[in-house]
Amino acid sequence: MRIAVLKERAAGETRVSATPETVKKFKALGAEVAVEAGAGETASIADADFAAAGAEVTADAASGADIVLGVQGPDPALLGGVKPGAWIVAGLDPFGQRSRVDAYAAAGLEALAMEFMPRITRAQSMDILSSQSNLAGYKAVIEAANAYGRAFPMMMTAAGTISAAKCFVMGVGVAGLQAIATARRLGAQVSATDVRSATKEQILSLGAKPIFVETVAGIEGEGAGGYATEMSEEYQKAQAELVSSHIAKQDIVITTALIPGRAAPRLITDAQIASMKPGSVIFDLAVAQGGNVEGSKADELVVKHGVKIIGYANTPAKLPADASALFARNLYNFLSAFWDKEAGRPVLDEEIGNAIRLTQGGKVVNERLLG
Ligand code: NAD
């Protein structure tokens, strides 16, 4: 069993899909690990550290591989030397990179999309969306604080008092919860909203104030796998009114709202931005999925009506060492959970295998892509 770790090639990608820790653990399972030279450099992991953990560091890591690991899906052109039917285990962006998925199928590869991991208790430690969103939620607040020309905490000084920043978090999934916790730690007064009513208690338990549409029903309970769906026009209108009255009083807004497989919902319009105080900061974590904020641009600072709007195409890549460590553990936790000692390789079960498998036997096989 030969596992290959390739250097990421996507623009702005700084993470790596294995660390010396996970290399050691794969070796303990009996696998060989080949790491492409320089793969860990942008995540502060030297080739020598991979070698010391037992990896073969080489220019041609994919050659002879049974399993290829990646943060993002590798270019099929780089996979000429892998074994027939080799697994590609990475964040494959199946909806956004459909032609690449087709190319994996045509090459006879078995592509496993880690972002399709079901949100069930036993798969929590394998969930790349959670591990990366958590760090992204933290970083969004840190970046917003950095761009803000004032302080977050209330300060009483001899020269007078500085009041606490007011921070509003829109979308309270994994990233939003971490954004609330981070803004609270920095001393801001925090409020938050979501369409899923189950988040109300979570917001309260973090010491923040829930701001919810009460006139139109939102999503009760956890919904399908805990995800949101598109809301009715009536709900959207009520939400827009609620947000308009609240947002004008905010200094910092962090938006994290996503709907799987669709463009991100628009939560903040230009008119609402105009109602905010000059110097306020909005961080749009959904900017790469179409954006929650009108006019936000990935990796650019946009100033509208004196309000700074920021957002990165790839926020976890701004914390490459920690993001890689968690991502690599997600991949190890996944493969090791299914490791069959006799076969000397992982053997997937139906529930998880069918959820994440995109291609097999030359065809696209995943229901979500065929549907
Ligand atoms: P996500 O990234 O898909 O979306 C972020 C948030 O945006 C969600 O809370 C969503 O409800 C919200 N949202 C969508 N449309 C909105 C709108 N118009 N206005 C305001 N908010 C809107 O979500 P996520 O971080 O992946 O988490 C979704 C859920 O899955 C959570 O309940 C989380 O606890 C759960 N989860 C479960 C597991 C597990 O059991 N293995 C793992 C991770 C997350």
Image: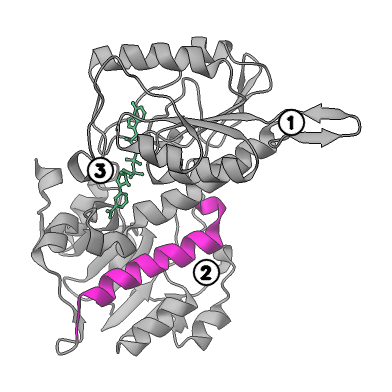
Amino acid, disc 2: Gly
**Direction from residue 327 to residue 77 in the image, left or right:** left
How many numbered circles does the render carry? 3
Sequence-wise, the earlier of marks 1 and 3 is 1
Crowd class of label 2 (few under 14; some 14 to 19; many from 20; radius 10 Å): many
Q: Mark 3 sits on what residue?
A: 226
Q: Are marks 2 and 3 in contact (CB under 8 Å)?
A: no
Q: Is residue 250 visible?
A: yes
Q: Is residue 179 above or below residue 58?
A: above
Q: CA distance from mark 1 to mark 2?
A: 36 Å
Q: Which is more toward the observer, 139 or 208?
A: 208
Q: Which is more toward the observer, 153 or 169?
A: 153
Q: Mark 1 sits on what residue?
A: 150
Question: In the rendering, which numbered label is found on residue 307?
Answer: none
Q: Is mark 3 within 8 Å of ligand 1?
A: yes
Q: Mark 2 sits on what residue?
A: 40
Q: What range of the chain is rendered magenta?
A: 316-340
Amino acid, disc 1: Arg
Q: In the image, what residue occupies the spot 68% across and 34% down?
A: 147
Q: Is residue 15 magenta?
A: no
**Direction from residue 229 to residue 321 in the image, left or right:** right
Residue 289 drawn at (x, y percent): 38, 35
Q: Is residue 325 magenta?
A: yes
Q: Quadrant of residue 55?
A: bottom left
Sequence-wise, the earlier of marks 2 and 3 is 2
Q: Which is more toward the observer, 213 or 263?
A: 213
Quadrant where the image shows the C terminus: top left
Q: Secondary structure at mark 3?
A: helix
Crowd class of label 1 (few under 14; some 14 to 19; many from 20; radius 10 Å): some
Q: Main secondary structure of the magenta part?
A: helix
